[in-house]
Amino acid sequence: MDMVNIINSNKSYFSSKHKIDSVMLALLINRFQILHFIIFSTERLKYPHMVWLIILGGVISQLNIYILSRWLSSHPGKKGIWGVYDLFGNVYSKIFLLVWLCFMFIKFIIISSYYVYLLHKYLMTQYPKPTLVLVLIISSVYLASKGFSNALKFSVITFVFSVGIFLLYILLMSDAFVSIQDIFPLFGNVFNCNFLNSVLLIWGFFSGPEYLILIGPYIRSDVNIHKSMFIGNLMTIIEYVAFFLGTFIFYGSDFLPYVQHSYINMINFLQFQFIQRIEMITLPVLMVNFTLSLAVILLSSFKAILYITGSKKKLKENTLAFFMTSSFFTFACIFFILKLFTTEIQALFWDDVLLYLSVFTYTSIPAIIFIAILAKSRRVK
């Protein structure tokens, strides 16, 4: 079988007829959570023993993962946007999706602006920010135009790229000047004056799966959804612990709190003969995570807009309506980054806004779905 037939085969991961399987679903959960780790970073967790809060946050996150997996496994959840109608009814489903749409719109703008901020600050200072925004969003719109199923499969590619970056961090840990003693003590008083902020930050790290409440129709029927999502969340816990302790080993507990975006600055210390600035590779590679997340948010928002406006047609992602939706999101991002995301102080402010919004959505959306499922099951009885 030649390469073309392999790609077009029904068994191919990237065939248009192939729904996402258990591996893809696990990677999808993992990549959406890792995105928030990239944005929020860990230097605000000032002590090594905060690693136990990360582990605890991951364990509690499994409760939300269970609720979301129960929803996606249910008959309404497998119907996607129309399953929301079955769960809430006509009026409440539109209210729920309208509020959810507003949150997704705000997140789309802040996430895209924050990546452009990082790219402009550390790599492409000579390029105007609107140009960088356009490159990011056009790539996201292109991925979204391929449809929900193909966009979700992009999680495999993002994971492969991320493995390469992870190996670079392992190389850093082999340098002579790093010391494993910097991660000690691993036990201490976590209930300090920064405890509440640390809890919110860690809970924000694990947010992201709430974006995926509409992907039910694109999951294979034989997938154990809870197991796959559980594994994805577990992968996130392991990555967070590794990166968190790695920053302490590299910088030391005394210096780390003064470093901004430690994961980006760490990689700058790698020296290769063939390239002087390794961030010229790593920062663009991070773009695949942002592209995936923005594409899924855009697709979900498009479907929510069609439902709220009462459209009975199943419009595809290459129609004029999708182009108009994408254009609105694009111009909103350009306006936002030109007017409201221009200084370091504004970047920190919107970083906090995204954190609090992520904490709120990751807490409220699974809770609302759980209450609605519980209420509906009682009405049926």
Image (tube, rainbow, N blue to C red):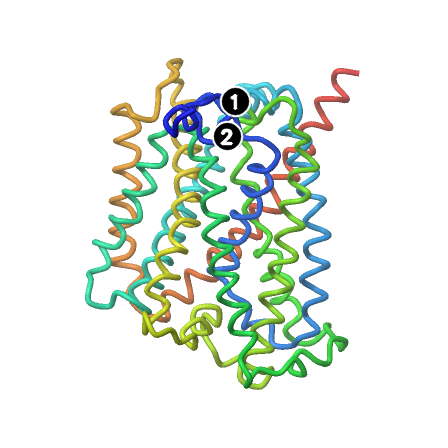
Identify the residue at the far front of this view. Answer: 1
- Quadrant hosting residue 141: top left
Residue 201, how many percent across, how many down? Answer: 58, 62
Residue 314 percent location from the top left of the image: 39, 16
Camera-nearest residue between 266 and 108: 266
What residue occupies the far right of the structure in this picture?
381
Q: Residue at x 30, y 45 (%)?
A: 137
How many labels sit on residues?
2
273 relative position to 267: left or right: left
Vertical placement of residue 134 versus 213, above or below = below
In which quadrant of the rendered view does residue 113 lie? bottom left
**Which corner quadrant holds the N terminus?**
top left
Residue visible at 61% across and 53% down?
236
Q: Nearer the viewer, residue 23 or 212?
A: 23
List the residue tagged with mark 2. 95
Against 347, residue 247 (above or below) is: below
Q: CB atoms at circles 1 and 2 under 8 Å apart?
A: yes
| Mark 2 surroundings: few (<14), some (14-19) or many (≥20) residues within 10 A | few
Q: Identify the mark at residue 110; answer none if there is no mark.
A: none
Kind of residue sitting beneath label 2: Ile
Q: CA distance from mark 1 to mark 2?
A: 6 Å
Q: Which residue is mark 1?
A: 91
284 lies above or below 212? below
Residue for point 61% across, 21% down: 76
Q: Amino acid at mark 1?
A: Val
